[in-house]
Image: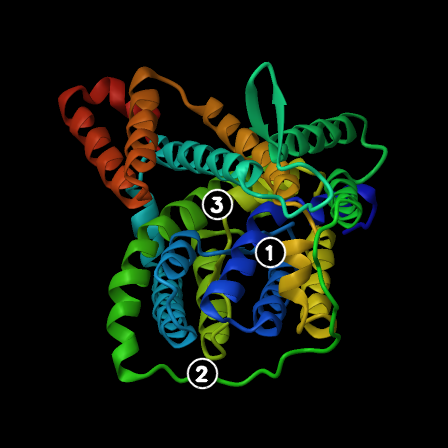
Amino acid sequence: MRLDRHELSGAFGDSGILFPLAASLIAVNGLSPTTVFIGAGIFYIAAALYFRLPMPVQPLKAFSAIAIAYALSPSVIAAGTLILGAAYFLLGATGLIRVVGRYVPFAVVKGIQLSLGITLLQGAWALARRPQGLASLPSGVTAGGTSAPIGLFIAAGALALALILLRWRFAPASLVVLSLGALLGALGGSDVGPLRLGPVPIAPTIPAAGDWWPALTLLAIPQLPLSIGNAMISMQDVARSYFGEGARRATLTGIARSMGLANLAVGVFAGMPMCHGAGGLTAHHRFGARTAAATLVIGATCIGLGLVFGQSALQIVTRGVPPAVLGALLAYVGWEHVQLVRALRGMLGWATCAVVAALATASGNLGVGVIAGIAFWYGALSVVPSRAGSNAR
């Protein structure tokens, strides 16, 4: 474990996913900022100490997106988090996740990673095109009769700076980009408003009887295939790709148990539902993280944000840095995640990967792509076993 500028840069490499979703859950669903950030911080630190890697902590994406879209209450979110926490822990504790992982083809895993990379790029584009909240700057730039949102230019500049810093590594890229983004927000007239120090009180949340059914059908069932595919199977594959023998603790059972315990703990307090996303590991790694020190830093930062600025955390996260800056970081991570498919070999492998990514992207549901990809793979295996077998896990 070491702490240098590379680790500091890698510590904040996943900010483009963590902070926007956390902020939305706080603003739309009424989750406590203190509970959200302290829960994420403790999970980061625990994961760093156990896995001994720059282990990512991310919001559950499908779960969070549905909860935000339907403006579900904290008690429904708590029920869904507890259901998934129990499911994850049982998958890991019983070893059932190993059985699932044994029958998911390598090409399907790569399709999951390709789909996630495309999703991240789409998210980056959306962040760049949305209003940036900069009163002193125009909302768009017009040239040749064509107008483009100012966020596209901010994102392009932030991405170019990140690439320069990553190429020559004389400063922590993500930290510099985020700091300059905050400076741009301050100079550009972002309305952060008066800040109040101190945490929001934390109290247990007991879901009502009527909360469990929508939590199961709306939140848990759509999220579970995504978690098994991206946060467990793909996560193990990416960890091995980046760290080799150093990822020996990042087993399917270890990852599943870790996610289970974390969600059972935060679910009691209606915290943010969380996982270990493969895209998050790519983010930390590509921005320089190589040891658990990076995740200890972001974990401590989240805890500090929850304790010191708990009452103003939403203002800082949503108004302090223009969304396009977070979008630039997200775009880089998405592109790097797409590159993971280069490990594929054989036409059948590429075809299966394409099926997963195409259907997952078109439907907006990774589970649809995964099921179709598995069916396509084994269907082809039964027809042409000699060719298909060359790309088995």
Q: What percent of the width, then of the height, locates residue 125?
A: 52, 34
The three-letter amino acid code for the residue at tag 1 is: Phe
For label 3, the residue is: 236
For label 2, the residue is: 205
User: Observer-nearest residue: 200 or 111?
Assistant: 200
Q: Nearer the viewer, mark 3 or mark 2?
A: 2
State left or right for residue 248 relative to residue 73. right
The span from disc 3 to disc 2 (Cα, nearest Å) is: 33 Å
State left or right for residue 288 relative to residue 382. right
In the rendered image, the residue lying farthest to the front is 145
Q: Look at the picture and state if 142 lies above or below 275.
A: above
In the rendered structure, which disc, 1 or 3, sits on the residue that comes first in sequence?
1
Which residue does the image show at 75% across and 30% down from the upper left?
161
Q: Residues within 10 Å of mark 1 (few under 14, many from 20)?
A: some
Quadrant in the picture for residue 163: top right
Q: Nearer the viewer, mark 1 or mark 2?
A: 2
Quadrant in the picture for residue 94: bottom left
Q: Residues within 10 Å of mark 3 (few under 14, many from 20)?
A: many
Which residue does the image show at 34% across and 61% down from the upper left?
70
In the rendered structure, which disc, 3 or 2, sits on the residue that comes first in sequence?
2
The three-letter amino acid code for the residue at tag 3 is: Gln
Where disc 3 sits, the SS reads helix
The span from disc 1 to disc 3 (Cα, nearest Å) is: 11 Å
State left or right for residue 144 relative to residue 83. right
Q: What percent of the width, then of the height, locates residue 90?
A: 35, 67
For label 1, the residue is: 51
In the rendered image, the residue lying farthest to the left is 383
Q: Look at the picture and state if 88 lies above or below 240.
A: below
Q: What percent of the width, then of the height, locates residue 1?
A: 76, 52
